[in-house]
Amino acid sequence: MTEEKKITRKKLKSAAAINKFMADYYYELSAASESGDPKIAWCTSVGPAEILRAMGYLVYFPETHSAMLGATRMATDLIPEANALGYSPDICSYLTADIGAFLKGVTPLAKIYEGITGIPKPDVLVFNTNQCRDVQDWFSWYGEKFNAPVLGVYTHRNVGNVSGALVSSIAKQMQDLTGSLERLSGRSLDLDKLKQVVALSRECSELWKKVLQTAASQPSPLTFFDATTLMGPAVVGRGTQKAVDVFKALLLELEQRIQNKEGAIEEEQFRIYWEGMPVWGRLRAHSELFAGLNANVLASTYCNSWIFSKLDPEDPFNSMAEAYTELFIVRSDAAKESYIRDMLDLYKIDGIIYHDAKTCPNNSNCRYGMPQRLEKQSGIPSLTIHGDLNDLRLLSDEQTKTNVEAFIEQLEESGK
Ligand code: SF4
């Protein structure tokens, strides 16, 4: 079982178009940052991007930048810079790595995209606390640095039932943002334009959902590790036609793989669900570790987080409020468990990996007995690995490898 096996990574052709999409996105932001036109809004990854886009802002997402700091393994050395300012090593390592990078004047954008020298300057920063409180602190720090206004939507968390009253209160907050955004941009919100953007965002979301659901096929044409790098347009491009176009091509390619019975890994013996954040600096190592054990990590809560099925162009504010509140991360443990049970059925899962990310309790759902409860209900075993999204000092590669190998061996012995 532990014998090393040579792994060939199967590339998707559509990945090139997605890389080009991301390059165009960052070059457009860079040009706007230099010229001052159009204005730039920073937004949290599950914030109200549609409103910003409909009002003519280009939208920049610092979390995606921070994930790049992780994937390029720049993050770990930058985190102490933010710690020195008083941001604890125990809080979000997206925040600490990103602020650390700014203080050191470095960015992965400059390494990847020739000619880009820095992150785009914000004219306004807009957060939603639906995911965590860290984003508010993170955006407030930059707001002060750039002397730019910081606006927020305050969403309750641990939500069981997404009630009408809750949706209305969040929709009202979203509507209230528009006054400040109009004053800043000098443009009024055009409701027809907003409906158009919400329709495109919904279409992007539906395509992304279909892309992810191709993994229900046996063998799965997609891995979680591929999906973490393919999902860029769902995060930064929702509400644009270009994002819709690249996902249509990706979906076609995956459907072709299904027709050809071509799996994403050479031999798919075990089907695994990933609960929690990726370890950005170990995407390749983890993908090879699992593939080498004939285990396909093929579905995840994380990549599903950019599916916004409730968006409705005919009712933009209420539907945005509902879509951004019914998300997994916002919900109670009971709602989360019900969601994961559905995923286990849909993807015919043999085992679950929980990633306990030290600096993100919001995406670490294994700390209050959930793995044990779900195993009791579903009979599907799980393994918790300890690590972090960005801070590589918080994980042990050896320990992870040993534990994953033992877990897959256990699945094999149980006849999965
Ligand atoms: S959800 Fe976690 S990783 Fe994301 S910004 Fe909040 S604390 Fe950071």
Image (cartoon, rainbow, N blue to C red):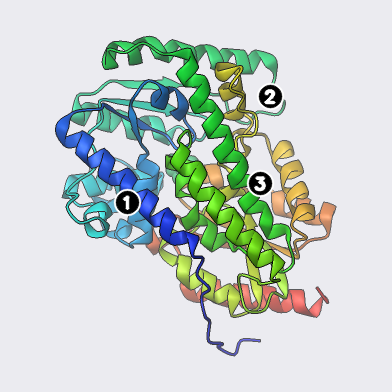
Which residue sits at x=74%, y=76%?
A: 410
Can you tell which mark lies on residue 92? none
Which residue sits at x=74%, y=57%?
A: 347
Could you tell me if the residues under marks 1 and 2 are in contact, i.e. CB atoms within 8 Å? no
Could you tell me if the residues under marks 3 and 1 are in contact, i.e. CB atoms within 8 Å? no
Which quadrant of the figure contains the C terminus? bottom right
Q: Amino acid at mark 3?
A: Tyr
Q: Is mark 1 within 8 Å of ligand 1?
A: no
Q: Amino acid at mark 1?
A: Ala
Which residue does the numbered mark 1 point to in the structure image?
23
Which residue sits at x=59%, y=63%?
A: 223
Label 3 or label 2, whichever comes before in sequence order: 2
Could you tell me residue 18's position as x and y percent? 43, 54
Q: Give SS at disc 2.
A: loop
Label 3 to label 1: alpha-carbon separation: 41 Å
Closest to the camera, between mark 1 and mark 2, is 1
Could you tell me residue 130's position as x and y percent? 52, 30
Residue 28 falls in which quadrant of the image?
Answer: top left
